[in-house]
Image (cartoon, rainbow, N blue to C red):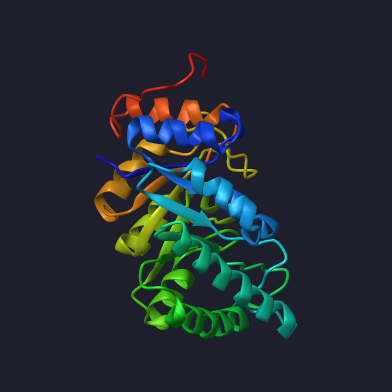
Amino acid sequence: MTTLFLCHSSELGHIEGTAGLCRANGYGIEVSDFSEVDVLGNADAVGTIAGSISGITGRALHAPYLGLDPVSADRSVGNRTLEVYRLACETAVQLDMHHIIVHSIYDPSQHSLREWYRKSVAFWRAFLSEAPESVRVHIENVMDSGPEILLDMIRETGMPNCDVNLDIGHARVYSDKPLAVWIRVLGRHIGYVHLHDNHGQADEHIGLGQGSIPLDDVCRMLKDCAPESVWAVESGGIGMTQSLRWLNRHGFIDAVSGLADNG
């Protein structure tokens, strides 16, 4: 069966709710709280989260992204980005997390594609060369227009501890290329997947089956083309319940324990 992680959901209250659902079903957890720099650098917050996720084997850390840019023309921003990612690695090791999610941070309004690519390869090669061996770094597509540039970038870094976090919702909204193309091109370079739904116009993060993404086809292609990838449900609110029920109904996961009756 699929290796499934749950991202923190406001539907389940504090992180303890998500963690409880993970423990009850043997799921891993992606801690999105660490996408805030203030949380990542707060020893008390890290300690609280450590207690909340005890007993969960699969663990992922979503690194910060707001205000960060590894290819910024402002060198201080690039240096700050590297510092934050190093701190993310230290925190991941401290909490026995083996996955770190980072954004590609390609913004066509800020970067030319050629310049972004050149600087990104240099940045990721430098960062990945010092990343702990126990941690795998997954680069998430956000505003990327297609999969080819991400694939080329990862190949050119030449680092074995890095692959793609395919966010299917982002690919649907920000790219003209069908998700089938993304999956076919990236293939086994997809190590991690963010699952959520939308209607193709905005990054809604709604429950699976509530939008218009061809999810049956997408999930079956992922099973065929990226069989070792981790799937992480990233639907907000009631979408978490809807997503888990959809995955169960369509045969991708077993029956789920501990779900609320709604959704």
Q: Using residue 186 as the reference point, say whether residue 112 is left or right of it.
A: right
Query: Which residue shows up at 36% across the image and 59% down it?
Result: 191
Name the residue: 62% across, 45% down: 203
Above or below, 183 against 204 in this view is below
Q: Is residue 14 visible?
A: yes
Q: Is residue 10 left or right of residue 30?
A: right
Quarter that holds the N terminus:
top left
How far from the left and from the top, in percent, is residue 138?
A: 45, 63
Residue at left offset 31%, top offset 24%: 255
- Give residue 6's position: percent from left, percent from top: 45, 40
Front-lying residue, 148 or 13: 13
Picture coordinates of residue 210 (x, y %)? 52, 28
Q: In the image, what residue occupies the spot 57% across and 36% down?
A: 9
Picture layout, residue 248 above or below residue 216: above
Q: Quadrant of residue 211?
A: top right
| Residue 194, above or below 125 | above
Residue 156 appears left or right of 35: left
**Residue 173 in view:** no
Q: Position of residue 72 (x, y in %)?
A: 69, 79
Q: Quadrant of residue 161?
A: bottom left
Most extreme residue toward the top is 261
User: So how many labels did they put on this image?
Assistant: 0
